[in-house]
Image (cartoon, grey):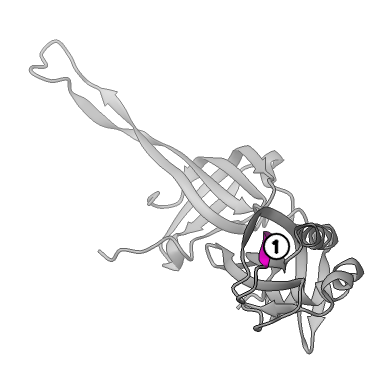
Amino acid sequence: MARAVGDGTTITHATTGFNANLVSVDSFDVTRTEVNQTHMGTTTVEDFAPGNFLDVTFTVTYQFDPALTTTPIDQVAEVVTIDWAGSGNTSVFTAFQTNVSMSSAVGELMQQTATYRATALSGAPL
Amino acid sequence: MSNTSPEAAIRKLLESAGDVTALRASRMYPGIAPNNTAHPFQVYSRVTREHYHHMTGHSGFAQARVQVDSYSDNKIEVDDLAEKTRVYLEPLSGSTTIGSNSITINRIRMEEDDATSEPSGDGSDLTLHRIRQEYIVEHAVSIP
C-alpha cells in the first residue's frame, strides 16, 4: 500500500456548496457498535458480535475567509464527500455540522474548525 | 501581483518617510553598508519568510521577517532614527509598486528590537551604536 501525505484532500458539500480552503481533517472517528452475547454458558471471555451500526464523526479545519459563504451549521444534513489526498478514494456521508469554532489571532491566518456527524453512509466509510 | 520582495518594499516605503530621510538621507543599503558610509545609515535584509498553504495549494499569504538596522556614532540619533522608522512603518498597508512589480501588504508590525554598541572598526575611537529591528510583514503572494 502506498503511503501518502494529506496534501490534496478536499471536502465538498452537495447541497449548500460550502467551500473553503481545507487545512486538515482530524479526529475522523468511526466506531462500530458491539453486541454483548455473553450468556450463562459462555466460558473464559465474554462473547461479542459486531453490530449493524456505525458512529461516524469527523472534524475539519479551514482557513476562514469572512467573504465566503457562511458555514452550514444551521442547515439540514447533506451529502459530504471527502476525497483523500486527491486520490479519488472517497468517504461519502450524509452529515451535518454539530459544532463550529473560530480562531482569530495576531499574525495567524483565521481558522474555522467544524465537527460533523454522519447520519448515513454511501459505501464503506474509509 | 506580488513579485516585489517585502524587504524591497520596506526600503521603498521608507523613501517616503520624511522624518527618517531627514536623518539618514538616502543611506539605506541591502545587506551591508559600503565602507566609510556617513552616519547615520540603515541596512535592511529579509531574515525569513513563512508561507501558508492549505490542502490543495498556496493560501496566497505570507509573513516575512525583515530586519532593519539603524547605525550611528550618536546614541540619541540612532534611537531617534529607529523609533521614527517604526512609527512610520507600522500603520502602513496596501499596494507598493517598484518598477513593473508590486506587493500588497496587509500589515507591518515590529516584532522585536535590540540595541548594541561596539567599536566602529574604522581605526578611530568612535563607538558605533546599532538598533536592530525585526518587522513582520504580512503580505499577499501570487498563487501558482
Residue B77 lies, in percent from the top left, at 81, 61
Q: Quadrant of residue B39?
A: bottom right
Q: Where is the N terminus of chain B found, in terms of image quarters? A: bottom right
* Range of residues picked out in magenta: B126-136
**Chain of the residue that carries numbered disc 1 in the rendered image:** B
Left or right? Give the position of B38 relative to A18. right
**Quadrant housing the C terminus of chain B:** bottom right
Q: Is residue B114 above or below residue B142?
A: above
Mark 1, secondary structure of its residue: strand
Q: Residue at x 48, y 61 (%)?
A: A9
In the rendered view, would you say A102 is above or below B6?
A: above
Query: Magenta span has A74?
Result: no
Residue A37 x, y percent position in the rendering: 22, 21
Residue drawn at 89 percent across, 71 percent down: B22
> Which secondary structure type mostly characterizes the magenta part of the structure?
strand
A27 is higher (above) or lower (below) than B59: above
As drawn, the residue found furthest toward the bottom would be: B100
Height in image: B119 above or below A45?
below
Residue depicted at x 52% and y 56%: A81
Q: What's the residue at 59%, 43% (across, down)?
A: A114
Q: Where is residue B93 drawn, in percent x and y?
A: 82, 64
Horizontal placement of A95 versus A33: left or right?
A: right
Is residue A71 visible in this depiction of the protein? yes
Q: Give the residue at the far left of this rendering.
A: A44
